[in-house]
Amino acid sequence: MFEAYQRGELEDDDEVAVAHGLRAEEFARLMESEAQVAVVQRWAAPYISAHLVDQLRLDDLYAGLWARARDKQRSLEEAGLADPDLAAAPLSREALLSWYLARRGRRAPRPRRGRAPGRVRDEPMFLRALLREHHYVRLRELRER
């Protein structure tokens, strides 16, 4: 909703506020708060990224993740799946998301009444990453049999 608000796509801010159980001034305060969060996120992102690898090393996770990444890349390349085509994927978008969430012990959220299911900002890239993970997991399962 905040992104639609920023782009000026909300037809009536007061109507949107009421639909979310807010008065107009509460809605304005919420949008201002979200704008401040967005500024902080943009400012902090480069610093977080720069220190993420160091934190993985400190937590003794880097070597294992690096080895998995190399194995994944090699396995996908050998199977001709390094650049999977979403249109030719063996799973639908919904099935792929359900597979991913199930592996994490979570269920897909139910769509909110009257609204389409949520979308990720760069959904094609995200789905492609999930498809690569799906292919890799399947390849590992075949290899371990």
Image (spheres, rainbow, N blue to C red):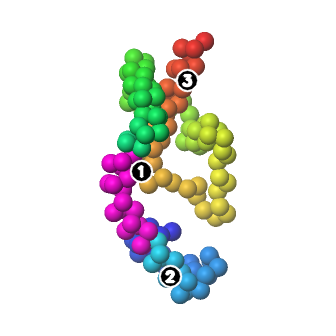
SS category of the residue bearing label 2: helix
Picture disc at residue 29: 2
Front tag of 2 and 1: 2
Label 3 to label 2, Cα distance in Å? 48 Å
Q: Label 2: few (<14), some or many (≥20) within 10 Å?
A: few
Q: Which residue is drawn at 38% across and 53% down?
A: 48
Residue 119, image x and y in percent? 51, 54
Residue 1, image x and y in percent? 51, 68
- Evaluate whether residue 112 shows in this view: yes
Extreme-front residue of the structure: 58
Camera-side residue of 123 and 41: 41
Relative to 89, residue 31 above or below: below
For disc 1, the marked residue is 122
Magenta extent: 35-52
Taking the magenta stretch, the answer to whether it contains residue 60 is: no
Which circle's residue, 2 or 1, is located before the other in the chain? Answer: 2
Q: Label 1: few (<14), some or many (≥20) within 10 Å?
A: few
Q: Which amino acid does label 3 sit on?
A: Arg
For disc 3, the marked residue is 138
Residue 62, image x and y in percent? 42, 34
Q: Which residue is drawn at 67% across and 46% down?
A: 107
- Left or right? Give the position of 47 relative to 20: left
